[in-house]
């Protein structure tokens, strides 16, 4: 079983689900899982570190242009991951994540 967390803007705790997923899922399998949460979005992959483990997060890459609300929880994970590799970066210069974010508890993007 693979765990995924759905981060929604304005909600403190993510929704957690478990799904059966191939060891190396294909693009269409992932789209079928992710898109019901993102709606009519354009899928963007974001590799992140969470508790020292590499995980895959997916967001709507047009979220800011669509004026979706900022997702503080997903942004914090994204920024912490980037800053762990590039500590000299000023966090205030980094992008935000907008709208819903779906993060798997393992690598699923190959």
Image (cartoon, rainbow, N blue to C red):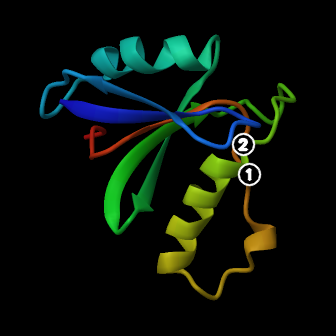
In the picture, the quarter occupied by the C terminus is: top left
Q: Position of residue 103 (x, y in %)?
A: 44, 39
**Which residue is pictured at 34% across the width and 69% down the height?**
52
x and y percentages locating residue 57 in the rendered image: 46, 42
Q: Which residue is mark 1?
A: 96
Q: Position of residue 34 (x, y in %)?
A: 45, 21
**Considering the numbered disc 2 on the image, is that residue within a helix, a strand or a loop?**
loop
Mark 2 touches mark 1? (CB < 8 Å)? yes
Question: Which of the 4 quarters of the picture holds residue 21?
Answer: top left
Q: Nearer the viewer, residue 46 or 6?
A: 6
How far separated are the C-alphas under marks 2 and 1?
A: 7 Å
Task: Tell me, for residue 71, which label it has, or none.
Answer: 2
Residue 12 — which label?
none
* Comparing labels 2 and 1, the label whose residue is closer to the camera: 2
Tell me: residue 67, above or below residue 103: above
Q: Residues within 10 Å of mark 1 (few under 14, many from 20)?
A: some
The quarter in which the N terminus is drawn is: top left
Asked if residue 41 is positioned above or below residue 106 in the image, the reply reads above
What residue is shown at x 67% (from left), y 43% (from top)?
Answer: 12
Label count reads 2
Q: Is residue 55 left or right of residue 48?
A: left
Q: Secondary structure at mark 1?
A: loop
Residue 3: give x, y in percent of width and height. Answer: 30, 35
């Amino acid at each position: 079983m693979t765990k995924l967390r759905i981060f929604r803007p304005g909600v403190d705790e993510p929704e957690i689900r478990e799904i059966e997923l191939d060891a190396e899922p294909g693009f269409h399998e992932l789209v079928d899982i992710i898109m019901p949460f993102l709606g009519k979005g354009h899928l963007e992959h974001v590799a992140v570190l969470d508790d020292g483990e590499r995980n895959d997060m997916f967001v709507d890459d047009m979220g800011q242009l669509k004026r979706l609300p900022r997702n503080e929880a997903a942004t914090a994970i994204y920024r912490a991951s980037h800053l762990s590799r590039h500590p000299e970066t000023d966090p205030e210069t980094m992008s935000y994540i907008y709208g819903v974010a779906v993060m798997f508890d393992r690598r699923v993007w190959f």
